[in-house]
Image (cartoon, rainbow, N blue to C red):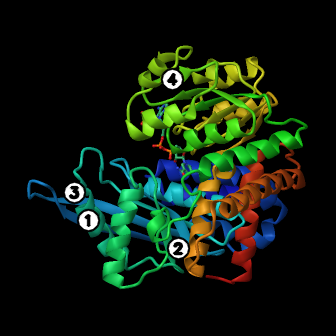
């Protein structure tokens, strides 16, 4: 039995009740087969795969808080510190009723490789709680965040573990958590990223994931003898990633003709008006029908359908599993050249396979949306220096990181005989750096 299969069996036995974690480990280890087979003896002797699939530690704790009726509520919270071979643990905090240990472990495991790809010194971690922020008052959110941080603050620190936002954890929650950390530990340090600009946040963090996605896509096109100029682009989503992806695509001379939210989607043949979209989604927090009402040529459709529109480039930026096999077939039939993921896991496995087999250049989220965490790491650097860099300075660094990521994943795929498979390339490039650091640091 190969080393990969042996370890997959162990991981399955030990984590039988964690389907998302098993799925992530299987996907990553499968795509790493070429590099693991080539170094089997060394990796086996050093138990590299057993160590990389077992978190350094998993912290589970109770979060008691008082709701507006005076009732005590109790939630279950997690911080999984997965691997710190290349830097302090780094990864977001997800607040959603679906959160459980398996989901946090899956996200933390993936984060090891994504963070490694950024070229910056950050390890992999993830955390969260089964708390549902929807419908809670501002006071309840603060009460929850303060109780959550009262326990979490024992395990984190600027050089130890630096959490960030994720689903349900935005600027407001980060602010409350930072305040509580400061109060208990008495230390003003860069212990969280995604902070407000008045207390240590970084310029460009808001735009980073969308802009980064376009910097990588532009490089991908350039390396295939194409440019963004004049290209038609389909984007899904209308949130943070989608909005800034659309803005940067327009700045590069492309035309984005679609966007979507959880209820419907827009086709705007004149090109999406980003300022209007921001006003509808970020200011009014309204539905996309309001966008269509303000644009005479735009069409609004209920449900899903973005991928039927003919385009050169598709950028899924909404949520997981939103680009299905039937969508992949439609994109290929319409002559789409490239698909780059702004969201985490938006393309199903069968759709990914179909796109790759039909010659579409496909870059998965681990590489394509790494601009967000990369800029969080730049926030950490600024906090350590006690300096704030200008917008242009951070933007230039972000661009350089995304271009480097593209070349690193392209090179890794070529070195292991899977040229053009950017999914395998991303896993290999991320893995190699972490393994070198683990080997250098001995058994730990
Ligand atoms: P937001 O919450 O800002 O936006 C998500 C958008 O997707 C919303 O417009 C939402 O609609 C829409 N949406 C949700 N479900 C569906 C659906 N089933 N079909 C179509 N649209 C849907 O999130 P972000 O933009 O921050 O994140 C988007 C994705 O990118 C997530 O997968 C996230 O994990 C990933 N990501 C984000 C990073 C970041 O820095 N923000 C970094 C790396 C990855 P509605 O407006 O109706 O809620």
* Disc 2/disc 4 C-alpha distance (Å): 43 Å
Task: Give the position of the C terminus as an image quadrant.
Answer: bottom right
In the foreground, 395 or 239: 395
Which residue is disc 2 drawn over? 56
Which residue is disc 3 drawn over? 140
* Disc 1/disc 4 C-alpha distance (Å): 38 Å
Relative placement, left or right, of 108 versus 176 is: right
- Mark sitting earlier along the chain (3/1): 1
Q: Secondary structure at mark 1?
A: strand
**Which residue is located at x 56 percent, y 44 percent?**
241
**Residue 168 visible at all:** yes
Mark on residue 63? Answer: 1
Q: Are marks 3 and 2 in contact (CB under 8 Å)?
A: no
Relative placement, left or right, of 265 versus 256 is: left
Relative placement, left or right, of 19 versus 416 is: left
- Residue 289, image quadrant: top left
- Mark sitting earlier along the chain (2/1): 2
* Disc 3/disc 4 C-alpha distance (Å): 33 Å
Mark on residue 265? Answer: 4
- Mark sitting earlier along the chain (2/4): 2
User: Compared to 316, does 444 lie above or below?
Assistant: below
Residue 273: image x %, image y %? Answer: 57, 29
Residue 329: image x %, image y %? Answer: 69, 21
Residue 217: image x %, image y %? Answer: 75, 42
* Disc 3/disc 1 C-alpha distance (Å): 13 Å
């Amino acid at each position: 039995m190969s080393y990969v299969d042996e370890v997959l069996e162990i991981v399955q036995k030990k984590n039988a009740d964690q389907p998302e974690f098993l799925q992530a480990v299987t996907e990553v280890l499968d795509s790493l087969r070429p590099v693991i087979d080539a170094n089997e003896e060394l990796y086996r002797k050093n138990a590299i795969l057993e160590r990389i699939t077992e978190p350094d530690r998993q912290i589970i704790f109770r979060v008691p808080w008082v709701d507006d009726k005076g009732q005590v509520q109790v939630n279950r919270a997690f911080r999984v510190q997965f691997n710190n071979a290349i830097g302090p643990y780094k990864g977001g905090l997800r607040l959603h009723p679906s959160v459980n240990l398996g989901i946090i472990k899956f996200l933390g495991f993936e984060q090891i490789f994504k963070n490694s790809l950024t070229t910056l010194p950050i390890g992999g971690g993830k955390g969260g709680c089964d708390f549902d922020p929807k419908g809670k008052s501002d006071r309840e959110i603060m009460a929850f965040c303060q109780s959550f941080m009262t326990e979490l603050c024992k395990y984190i620190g600027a050089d130890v573990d630096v959490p960030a936002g994720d689903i349900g954890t935005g600027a407001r929650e980060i602010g409350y958590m930072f305040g509580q950390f400061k109060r208990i530990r008495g230390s003003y340090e860069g212990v969280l990223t995604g902070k407000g600009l008045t207390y240590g946040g970084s310029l460009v963090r808001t735009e980073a994931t969308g802009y980064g996605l376009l910097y990588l896509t532009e490089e991908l096109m350039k390396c295939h003898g194409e440019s963004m100029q004049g290209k038609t682009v389909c984007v899904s989503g209308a949130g943070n990633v989608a909005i800034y992806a659309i803005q940067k695509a327009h700045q590069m001379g492309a035309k984005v003709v679609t966007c979507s939210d959880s209820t419907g989607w827009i086709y705007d043949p004149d090109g999406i008006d980003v300022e209007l979209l921001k006003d509808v989604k970020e200011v009014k927090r309204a539905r996309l029908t309001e966008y269509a009402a303000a644009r005479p040529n735009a069409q609004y459709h209920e449900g899903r359908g973005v991928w039927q529109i003919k385009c050169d480039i598709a950028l899924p930026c909404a949520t997981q599993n939103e680009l299905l096999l039937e969508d992949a077939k439609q994109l290929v039939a319409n002559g789409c050249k490239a698909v780059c993921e702004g969201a985490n896991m938006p393309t199903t496995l069968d759709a990914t396979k179909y796109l790759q087999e039909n010659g579409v250049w496909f870059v998965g989220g681990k590489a394509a949306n790494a601009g967000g965490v990369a800029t969080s790491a730049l926030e950490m650097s600024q906090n350590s220096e006690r300096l704030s860099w200008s917008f242009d300075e951070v933007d230039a660094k972000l661009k350089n990181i995304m271009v480097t990521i593209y070349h690193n994943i392209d090179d890794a795929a070529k070195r292991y005989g899977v040229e053009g498979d950017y999914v395998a390339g991303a896993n290999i490039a991320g893995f190699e750096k972490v393994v070198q650091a683990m080997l250098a640091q001995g058994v730990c």
